[in-house]
Structure formats: structure tokens, C-alpha cells
Amino acid sequence: MGSITTSILLGIAAAGANAFGGAVLVQKDWDKKYLRYFIAVGAGFMLGTAMLEMLPESIRVSGPNAPLLLLIGYFIVHFFEHTVTSHFHFGEETHKEEFADNHRVFSVIFGLVIHTFFDGIAIASGFLVSSWLGWVIFFAVILHKVPEGFTASSIMLAGGHSKKNAWLASALLGFATFLGVVTVTTFTRSLPAGLPLSAGVTLYVAASDLIPEVNREPGTLVALAVFLGVGMFLVLQHFFH
Ligand SMILES: [Zn+2]
Ligand SMILES: [Zn+2]
């Protein structure tokens, strides 16, 4: 199977995980405490992938432009998730009072759409470099896709929207991811920009969206789950790279 076909299929899988996260949230009888463990493992795996694979490959592909593009990628997410929007954190949103204003709901969803678009850019850029890089980025992305859909749907519910629309918001994130994949597979010459930009995005999502969420959970077990995520990455790297 060609790298383009593979990245499109995995883009669909990642999109499905967003929609799955949203579907899980709108079902009430789900124990949400496991979500933080999911987030913790995902954060560790993403940090390993961003720093030990995406960063060196970005420098190889983009040369001296890579560090600046990485920084820009980092701040793109900071701007759209946390500057334009006044209240955002990963995980289940329960602060209804923050989302009485519909404008706020949509600005957060928009911020997440930008972020998930780069999740797709990351997957497809990875496959343009090597199938190992594509797969490892896919795993890093898929590990935070369920909580991501969960986050989007819970914000919609906090804003008083219907369950159906809450789920549709998570599906929209999936669509944005798929669009990111299609953008890179269509414009393959965007790789020298897309890879370092999405490396910066991955770094932000892991270190500045997910890790703070892990640290909100009391106890050492959830903090240890981050190391489990890094460990999973290192094992994969040892055997498959
Ligand atoms: Zn909140
Ligand atoms: Zn994401």
C-alpha cells in the first residue's frame, strides 16, 4: 500500500476516534475517571514522538528553518486554544457558567479544529518521510483522539447544546483531521513546512494541554502513567525503527 493511501486510511481512523470520544461522552453511564489515565499515557507517548522523532526529522527535512517553524506551530495552538478563547482545558468540561455565551463555545471548538487539522498534517507528513515515522505519529495522535472528542462534546453540552450537536462537534474535529491529511497528500511539497509546524503543535498539545490535565489529578499513579506512555514509545522505537 502506498504512503498516501495509508495516511488517508489512518486519517479516517483518527477521525473515527474523535467521533468515538464524542459518542462515549454523550452516553451518561461511563466512568470518566479513566479519561485522565488515557490522557497521561497519550502525553508521554506524544512527548517521546515529538522530541525524539519529529524534531530531528524536521531538522533533516527543513534544515535551519525547522526550529522557527516548530516555535510557530507551538504558538498557533496557544493562540487559537488559549488566547482567542478565555476558558479551555483538555478533558471533561463541567464549568457550565463559562459557556453560557454561545460565542465562547464556538471559539473553543474553532481552536480545537485548528489543532486537529494539524494532527492530520502530522500523520501525512510522517508518512512522506517514512512509514515508521507515519505510524508512530499516528499512534501519538490516536492516543489523544478519544479524549479530544470527549472534550469537544462536553464543551457543547456545558453550553446547553443537544447531545446530537455535541457529538457532531467531535465529528467535526475528525473531519478537520482528515482534511489535514488530505492537504498534505495533495500538496506533498508542503512537507518542509508541515512537519516542523505539526511537531510544534504536537509538543504544545502534549506538554501544555495534556500534562496540565494530568497534574490536576491527585495521586502518583496518573503521573506515572505518563512514563508508561514514554516507555511504550521507546519500546516501539527500539523494535521498529
Ligand atoms: Zn472548565
Ligand atoms: Zn489532537
Image: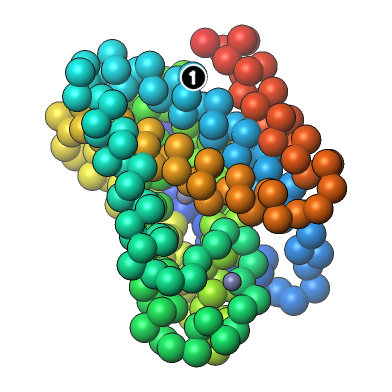
Disc 1 residue lies near ligand 2 with CB under 8 A = no
Residue 141: horizontal and vertical position, in percent? 50, 41
Answer left or right for 12 relative to 189: right
The image shows residue 125 at horizontal and vertical percentages of 32, 31
The residue indicated by pointer 1 is 52
- Across the whole image, how many numbered discs are drawn on residues? 1
Which residue is located at x 37 percent, y 52 percent?
Answer: 77
x then y, percent, for residue 233: 61, 24
Q: Is residue 60 visible?
A: yes
Q: What residue is rendered at 16% in x and 37% in y?
A: 187
Q: Say what secondary structure mark 1 lies in.
A: helix
In the foreground, 134 or 199: 199
* Residue 95 on image: x %, y %: 61, 78
Q: Is residue 7 above or below residue 216?
A: above
Question: Is residue 175 shown left or right of residue 42?
Answer: left
Q: Nearer the viewer, residue 62 or 174?
A: 62
**Compared with residue 109, is residue 199 higher up or lower down, i.e. above or below?**
above
Q: Quadrant of residue 176?
A: bottom left
From this view, report whether residue 189 is shown above or below residue 40: above
Give the residue drawn at x 74%, y 76%.
28
Location of the N terminus by quadrant is top left
- Residue at image position (44%, 57%) is 174
Please name the amino acid that badge 1 sits on.
Leu
Instruction: Confirm whether residue 163 shows in the render.
Output: no
